[in-house]
Structures are given as C-alpha cells and as structure tokens.
Image (cartoon, rainbow, N blue to C red):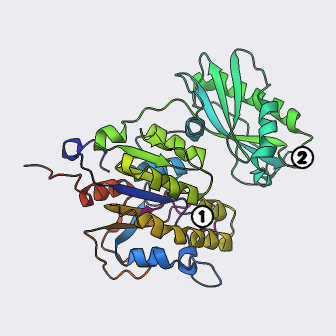
Amino acid sequence: MIDLEQLRDCYVSTPSKIVLLVVDGLGGLAHPDTGRSELETANLPNLDAMAQESACGLTTPVLPGVAPGSGPGHLALFGYDPLKYLIGRGALEALGVEVELRPGDVAARGNFCTVDDSGSLVDRRAGRIPTELSAPLCRRLDGIELDGVRVDVFPVQDYRFVLRLRGEGLSERVSETDPQITGVPALEVKPLEPAAKKTAQLVNQFVDQARRLLSEEERGNMVLLRGWAQLPSLPPMGEVYRLQPAAIAAYPMYRGLATVAGMKIIPTGMSFSDEVETLRANYDAHDFFFIHYKPADAAGEDGDFDAKVRALEALDPLIPQIRALNPDVFMVAGDHATPAIMAAHSWHPVPFMLNSSLTRGEGVASFDEKACGLGSIGRIPATNIMLLALSHSGKLTKFGP
C-alpha cells in the first residue's frame, strides 16, 4: 500500500477543485426477499445518471475481509494507510467537538446505554436518546472524582459523549467496555500492557460510579466506553498534497477526523442540505472539500433496510446542487459498507465513482455494488482514490524521469 508521502515530489498546486462526498456506510448486501441491495433498491436517478458519466469501481477500505471502523475507513479515503496511522475514536470524537487534548491526556468515546436489572445490555445506544436528554446526564457524570486524575465528560450528540482523563502516567492501551452485542453485561476494562494498569483501574472506578449515578434512569442507565486514544500526529494532507483542504460535516467525529488530517473545519448546520449550502458559500476559498453524509450508516447499523433505502433516496436530490458547482473532480465514496441485513460494518467492497471532464462514461448503468464492480477502475485500495483525484484534476505530475 502506497503511503501518501511517497509521491510528495509529484504533487502540484493548481486552481482546480476536488469534492469528495463520503456516504457513510454506503455499501450493502442483498435483501433475502428481493435479492437486491439497498443501493439497487433505492430510486437514485441523479446518482445513476452521474455513474453513467463517470469512472466507477469498488474500494477496499483496509484489507480484504477486514471490517473497518469509521476512522480507518475515512483516513484511507484521504490517502493515509489505515494500518500505519492508527487513531482511536476517542481522540476523534474529542477533537470533533473541540475538546482540548494535551500530550498525556486519554480520551474515550462514550455511549449511554440501557441495561436490565441484572446489568445485561438491552440497547447499546439507549434508544438513541436525543442530546437534550443526554446532556444533563453528562453533567452528572462530569462530577465524578477519581484520585490523582482529572475527569471531564463532554456531550457530543444524542447518546454519545467524550470522557477525558488528565493526569500523570495514563495510557491508551486499555480494553473497551462495549461487548458489541446485547444480552450480556458491559466488559471490565483490562490493561493491554503493564504500564496501563493504573488507567484500567481508574476507568473501572469511573464506570462503577457512573452505574450508581444513572441507575434510576429509564433508558440511559449505564455507559459504554471504547476507542481509547491519546493525541495523534499525522502528516497534514494540505502540506503533503499541496492542497487547501476543507471539511464540512455535521457529525463531530468526522470533524475530528478532518482535524487530524489537517483540514480546515467549516461550521455548518445539522442537515446535509445545510452542508451543501455551506459548500456553495465557501467554494471559492478552497481547492479540496470533504463533505459527509451520515444517515445511511445509522440506518444500516439499526438493521433497518427500508430506512437505509430512504436515506439514500434523500441524498439523491442534492447531488445536482453539488454538480452545479462544476468541480473539476467530484467523487462519491463510502468509508465502509454497513449492510442492513448485518446491522454492522462489514468487510465488503464499497461502490465508488469519479466524475471529471476526462470521464465520459463507460457503460455503467447505475450506482450500486454490481454495476460499479464492472467499471474501469476495478477494485482498488481506498487509499488510491486521492491519487485518481489529483491526476484527474491536474495536481499529480509524472513520476520518475
């Protein structure tokens, strides 16, 4: 897998514009009753028309057979080797809501969840309780005190929060409490190396106190913690690629990812139409835009096939507004597949298309897994799409003499 810095001398700055739309959890699998995936089922006239004028293919986010988290999936699309640049979700969530991370701090992504009287998980996301209900719970947890460490809890969105620990001798090398299934209790945190023993003990104390503080709640009566991470350091993609990159994302974690990659974060609203309007309003100020669409992934994780179809259909009418800006390169990609029939991220290759003045269509009739699999791009590592974007926009010169 090529590292984004290996071709540093070939990247050139030009006025051309690149737009990367990441449809979170884009890929899917066939419904057992119809034999068609979510993309094949959805009515997507604009995405299909764009596919007919584009170069198409499938991307592998990490490696064949490996189901990626959103962090590795996105970093691969930005050109970073996800096996080299490992970043915990806690740091991404923290940076996404502008929580300060100092060297030595440890952050985790937290979920409010629902457990029964025996302590077994009933709902890992507490029914996706809204922010107005979760924020007071965060304030309650923020009052927890542990010996020798500062504890801070920050609301993120809906059922999510960030836990930050600040003190001496902390380590990110501890296990998670989320078992990823219901019907079992949350896991005890364990050190993954001897130096992490102190951190594991502190986190278990936090969880015990949180359980007592939340015990009377109907839905958010327990917490799950995962993605332990300290402050990451990546080569800035703007510096490496000679770009002026910007990110437009309603969800905090994806702003965190863009921050780690060195993009400028442009404030936007909560809907994708807000994001598209933000793109239009800031289009002259940057030459690379990452714009993010979340609802397809949320529906897939809920195992709701019809809701994922509706989410894809809600995206489609906004595609012409992006195309009307006439970017030199417009790519539609996914960070991973989230098939509704699996209700989880999966390892399956993800549809991808690239539209530019150099692509005039190649017989691909629609934007879905089967059709894109027949495209000229074939199946490629997701890390390669930035090279395609740069070459199609005149930002990648000849390699070698």
207 over 265 or under it: above or below? above
Please indicate whether residue 120 sits to the left or right of residue 37 in the image: right
Task: Give the image quarter of residue 375.
Answer: bottom left
Q: Which mark is residue 256?
A: none
Q: Nearer the viewer, mark 2 or mark 1?
A: 1
Magenta segment range?
Answer: 332-349
132 over 138 or under it: above or below? below
What kind of element bears circle 1? helix
Is 345 magenta? The answer is: yes
Label 2 crowding class (10 Å Cα cut-off): few <14, some 14-19, many 20+?
Answer: few
Is 318 magenta? The answer is: no
Q: Looking at the picture, how far across and down is residue 327, in whole percent? A: 35, 61
Q: Which of 87/197 is in front?
A: 87
Q: Amino acid at mark 2?
A: Ser
Q: Looking at the picture, how far across and down is residue 357, in whole percent? A: 27, 68
Residue 347 appearing in the image: yes
Whichever of labels 2 and 1 marks the residue nearer the N terminus, that label is: 2
**Residue wearing tag 2:** 118
Q: Amino acid at mark 1?
A: Ala
**Residue wearing tag 1:** 296
Q: Which of 10/121 is in front?
A: 10
What kind of element bears circle 2? loop
The residue at the point 34 percent across, 76 percent down is: 53
Q: Looking at the picture, how far across and down is residue 346, in whole percent? A: 55, 61
326 over 13 or under it: above or below? below
Q: Are marks 2 and 1 in contact (CB under 8 Å)?
A: no
Residue 368 appearing in the image: no
Q: Looking at the picture, how far across and down is residue 389, in whole percent? A: 31, 57
Residue located farthest toward the bottom when viewing the structure as drawn: 34
